[in-house]
Every structure is written in structure tokens, then in C-alpha cells.
Amino acid sequence: MSDDEATGAMTAAARLFGRLLLRELDAPTLAELRQDDVCDALAALDVPVPDDAALPALAQRYFELFLHPDGALPPVQSLWHNGQYDGDPAASVRRVADAANLALTDNARGAAPDHLGCVLILWAELREPRPELADALRRHHFAWAELALQHTLADDGFYGAVCRATLSFVRQLRASEG
């Protein structure tokens, strides 16, 4: 794989994982996951693409794992660092987005700016046009993700597989130098 292909794959993975963490799986997104190239990439990561009949159960599972997890917190950095929404990590992510003239709400559907899904999407948006800002996100806004996703790893369904793949991606990203 060339450097350009690797960069494109990392960017696409960050966007996809960010999107899947930000909102429950719906029919249009499921249709996108079924596209041959996406389906093949997910299969290589041991992420099964569910069928349409699974959507109601997946909506409930999304709620249980990400919005109201039992014994854990939603994947929002301020919650993990400060115990409340909109702490210093949120302000830092906003400053990075502002420096790049990007609006966080375009892809985030009103989620906290330091939600792991938002940070992944923002990193993807910054990767090529503003690599220095993407690197700042990489250095300051991903270390907590492992702890935040820990409770999801034992889930044997779609979201558990997504979180295992996301965590593998975040580890790879954190190990890189920009």
C-alpha cells in the first residue's frame, strides 16, 4: 500500500469509526456499510455487517453501551477527566476546530466536542489540510479512549466489534508520529 493509500485508509477509518460511535446504526448507514469495499474492510477487522432486522436491537444496544452505560461513562473525554461535560478537553477540541475554521456540529449531531466520535472525525478532517492540528489531537485527545471503550470490549455483537476495531485504530494512531 502506498503512503497516499495508507493515508486515505486511515482517514476513512477515522470517519467511519467516529460516525458509528456518534449515533446508532440506521438503515442508510447500514446500506453504506454493505458497499463492497466497506464491507470487505470491516470483514478484515472482524466487524460483521448486521442485517436490517437487527436495527431495533442495535438501537437499544447503542443506548446501553454509549449513552447510558452501566458502571461506565459515555465516551466523552471531559467526563473521563473531569467528571462533567464541557471541561478543559472540550475547550481544547473547540480551539483546534476553530484554528482550522471547522464547525464541530456538521458531523456530530450536537454531541459533545470531546466525544470520541467527534474527535475521530475532526482528526480525519484535519489530517491532510492541517497535519499539525491533527497531530495535536493525536497527542492530547486519544489516550483516554482505551479506558472509555473498555466496558464495550466484551460485547459480542456489532458494537463490541466496532469498539475493538476502533481501539486498535486509536492505538495505531497514538503510536504514530503524526
Image (cartoon, rainbow, N blue to C red):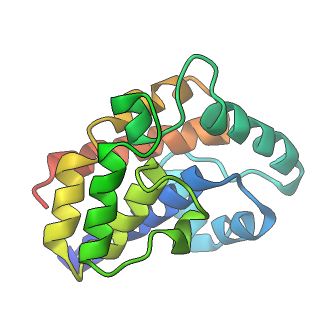
Residue at x-position 17% and y-position 50%: 139
Residue at x-position 78% and y-position 45%: 59
Q: Residue 141 location, x and y as percent? A: 28, 48
Exactly how many numbered labels are in the figure?
A: 0
Is 170 placed above or below 136 here? above
Is 176 on the left or on the right of 168, as rendered? left
Q: Is any part of residue 10 visible from this angle?
A: no
Q: Is any part of residue 97 visible from this angle?
A: yes
Is 7 placed above or below 143 here? below
Q: Quadrant of residue 2?
A: bottom left
Q: Nearer the viewer, residue 111 or 4?
A: 111
Q: Residue 60 location, x and y as percent? A: 79, 38
Q: Residue 84 location, x and y as percent? A: 45, 33
Is 102 placed above or below 72 here? below
Q: Nearer the viewer, residue 96 or 143?
A: 96
Q: Residue 1 location, x and y as percent? A: 25, 71
Q: Quadrant of the C terminus?
A: bottom left
Residue at x-position 83% and y-position 50%: 55
